[in-house]
Every structure is written in C-alpha cells, then in structure tokens.
Amino acid sequence: MDVIRVTGGARLAGDVAAVGAKNSALKLMAATLLAPGRSVIGNVPLITDIAVMAEVLRRLGCQVEMAGDRVAVTAPEQPGTDAAYDLVRQLRASICVLGPLLARCGYARVAHPGGDAIGSRGLDLHVAGLTRMGAEVTGEHGYVIASAPGGLRGASIWLDFPSVGATENLLMAAVLARGVTEIDNAAREPEIVDLCAMLTGMGARISGAGSSRLEVAGVPTLRPVQHACVGDRIVAGTWAFGAAMTRGDVTVTGVDPRFIEIALDKLVLAGCLVETGVQSLRVRMDRRPDAVDVVTLPFPGFATDLLPMAIALAAVSDGSSLVTENIFDGRFMFINEMARLGAQIQTDGHHAVVRGRERLSSAPVRATDIRAGAGLVMAALCTDGVTEISGVHHIDRGYPDVVPDLRRLGATVERAVVPDAPAISLAPLRPAGPAGPGGLAGPGGLAGPGGLAGPGGAAGPGGAAGPGGAAPGQ
Ligand code: UD1
C-alpha cells in the first residue's frame, strides 16, 4: 500500500497553485449530458474521481477524452439511462447525472450512492424537487428510478436545507423543463455559480446564481460549450491553514479568496497576516496561533470540508477551541487518528473541544476521507518526528500533487510503498494441533495467555505474534 511520510518541523513557505475544484468539475462533466455534441471543460484536476466520472459518462454513451487538465465529452443524441452501482459507489457525485438524464431522456435509473466515511447523505430533497417538477421517483433494489415520460415542467421548489447536490440536480433538470422553475433556499456555493455559468454558456436561462433563490426558464434544447472550472477553495484553504500551523508564508494562486473569506478571517483571528488578490491569497504567520472557535455552515459559512484543517490548527494553537460541525453527522470520525498524534480532543455530538499543544507527537495514522487525510498531513508537519499516513488513496482524490507541492514549500515528505499488513487467518484457531508445553503453540496452533504464537498464529492477551500474526494494540 502507499503511504506518505511526513517529517515534522518544516515551515511551509513559497507559492502553490490551487487546482480546479473537484466538486465543480464532476458536476460540470455531468452537465455535458444536457446537450448533444462535444463540450470541453478546462482546469480539471487530475484525480481518480474525474476518471470515474468519465467512465460513468462513457457507459451512458458519451465519448470522453482526457488530455492534461482538459476533458472533452461528446454526448450522444440519445444517452443511456442507467448509472450502475459499481461506479456510483466509488463516487457519490455521480448521483448528479440523475437530473440531466431525466431532463434529456424522461427516464433515469441511478444507483443509490449510500453514505460514506463522513456520514449519511440523504436524497429526499432531490426526490421531492424532481417530484414537484412532475417526475415519478421510486426506489427499487438500491436504485433511484425517475421517470417523466411527458417531460418535466417548471415548479416552485423550497429546499428544507440548502443542499449542494439537490440544488445541482434540480438546476440541471430545470434548464430543459417546460416553464419556469424557482428554487428557494438554494445552495450558494461557488461551485453552484460555476455550474450556472456553464449552463448559461450552453444556452440555459438562469437568474440568481450565488443567491438563495434561483429562477430557471426552461429552454427546449441546449448547445455544447467550452468552460474552465473554477479554482478549488478547499485546496486553497488547506494550504492557508498549513501556513498558519507551521508559522509559514504561503501564497496560493488560481482561486478567488472570497470563496473562503470566513476561513481566512479565522486565520486573522488566530494571528496570521492575510493578503488577498483577485485570484490569490497569501498567509503569513510568525508565532504560535491563538485558539479560535469554528462553526461549519453552508456557504458563505465556514466550509465543512475545511473542518479537519480547523481541528489540526486548533490542536497546535494556544488555548482551547470549540469546533462545531453542522453538515455531516460523521465528520468527526477521523478524530481518533488526530488523537494518535497527541491532539487533545473531546467530542460531544456535533461539537469538539480541542485543547492546543505546542507540538504533536508523530505516529502511524490512517486517512479516513479526503479532507481528514489533508488535515492529518498538515498536523504531521507539526509533530516531533516522522509520521506515516496510510489511506493515501483518499488524499489523492482531492490533492493530485500533494507530495511535490509540500516539497516545493519546504517540507520533508515522501511517498512510499510498504507491504500491506498481513491478513489474520482464522485457520490457527481451528483445532488442528494441540498447543505445546508452556503455552507455546506449534505452527497453526493457538497460544495461551502470555504465550507466543507460532508462524501464522494469533497471540493471546499479552502475547507476541509470530510472522503473520498480530499483537494486541497494533
Ligand atoms: C457537501 C457540502 C459541500 C461540499 C461537498 C463535498 C454543504 C452544504 N455541502 O455537498 O459544500 O463541497 O459536500 O464534500 O456544505 N441532505 C439530505 N437530503 C438531501 C440532500 C442532502 O438530508 O436530499 C443532507 C445530507 O445528508 C448532508 C447535508 O444535507 O447532511 C448536506 O448535503 P449536500 O449539500 O447535498 O451534500 P453534498 O452535495 O455532498
């Protein structure tokens, strides 16, 4: 398996470019389904999720070419209507093909993506909105099945919560619906604004992008488009927090700093000097950060995807921070990994209290999701030794060049391949051979308490495992 080894103590300094926003690019790719012909999206990050979405589109009959940071999608006159579980389970964002397919074909069958490592993620708002637009939506055998044989019609929709995914799906359904659709309490994230810009370029009629009320006048057809994806505010925020934590000086380019205004304001409160340009931001810090409280909220609030970075900052700040998560019920699942680095964190429901320490303590840790992984990398920079982070495939999903970027900024970091932990077999527990005298197991035998397991054996409490076994606590 791949690991990232980070040596603590570096100060991040220099320039780094934010890639195109993953959370925008994936939705823009889905939007290409809305118009037959060849659309081209630029500034796309080179990450696995993009390759998975390309495969989702290919299976729907599109031709997809990827070259550098450009993705060209040629959508057919008659796309397929099925997005299967084997792909959708790898990429929750693939649920956003539901709206475009329903709009184009009057029918779509998309696997239910289920929850993921940051908690449950419902679809009720997607379903309620599409139903108001005249679709019949059911769930069967793990699939969401939506049909509107006579086409979708404009409707007034009120979202109970400004869900990003529901806003995107409803927007992409509404652009080809008959009549006007109003979406109230819509999400206002920059990625929604980016999607509206691309749809408008395709000939859609949308007003209110970036506000909580979107108005869409449906048109009969759309045309292909060329569009450049917006910069990734979460990647930019990750570097900004990294600079603050390592008493560094980092300039991030390729992103509008207004996208993370509240996060940057928190860094100012922590003691950083923050300068912003049109498409850049610079964060400088020359001392230990002061503790600041953080509450995640839909945009323009503090982004939930930056919560792990806020926890990492709090872990090395002077004082105690109260961090509140309001979007995902499982966002704190990575806290145990932070605790392995010596972070002092107590959680209660959707609150975490973090008592800052001057320095963290290096340890092997595992990334449980993209942003948790990034938070662990930043925390590892503030440890007293070498931290080995596994679960790197999660980090790769959001940060295509994290190791070269960190090196350029002055960190000592490497990517390495280490052998997977050996699988523990039940075979030794089966009554193959009796244990030898003194509790010492023969090959395949079971050691008693305090005993020593033979090859492939499992040690009892307090015992040491032989090759292929596992000692308690490892
Ligand atoms: C969310 C984030 C988005 C981030 C993305 C990737 C918010 C509001 N959304 O978008 O900023 O870029 O993850 O990590 O910060 N929900 C329902 N029913 C629905 C839809 C959503 O209950 O039909 C709930 C979800 O379970 C979740 C919350 O609403 O608790 C946010 O969902 P949503 O904004 O749709 O999630 P994403 O689109 O994944």
Image (spheres, grey):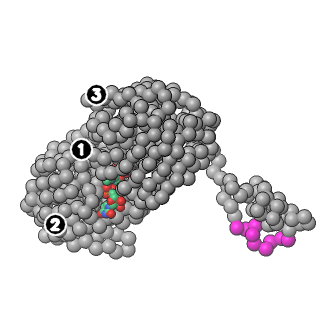
Q: Residue at x 12, y 54 (%)?
A: 215
Q: Give residue 280's mark.
A: none
Secondary structure at numbered mark 2: loop
Is ligand 1 within 8 Å of the beta carbon of the residue shown at mark 3? Answer: no
Question: Which corner quadrant of the figure contains ligand 1?
Answer: bottom left
Question: Residue 419 colored magenta?
Answer: no
Where's residue 154, x and y in %?
A: 11, 62
Is residue 310 rendered to the left or right of residue 379? left
Where's residue 109, x and y in %?
A: 30, 67
Is ligand 1 within 8 Å of the beta carbon of the residue shown at mark 1? Answer: no
Where's residue 246, x and y in %?
A: 50, 31
Q: Amino acid at mark 3?
A: Gly
Where's residue 389, x and y in %?
A: 57, 44
For label 1, the residue is 194
CA gap, disc 3 to disc 2? 42 Å
Q: Give residue 133's mark.
A: 2
User: Of discs 3 and 1, which sits in the foreground?
Assistant: 3
Secondary structure at numbered mark 3: loop
In magenta, the rendered stretch is 426-434
Q: Residue at x 84, y 64 (%)?
A: 441
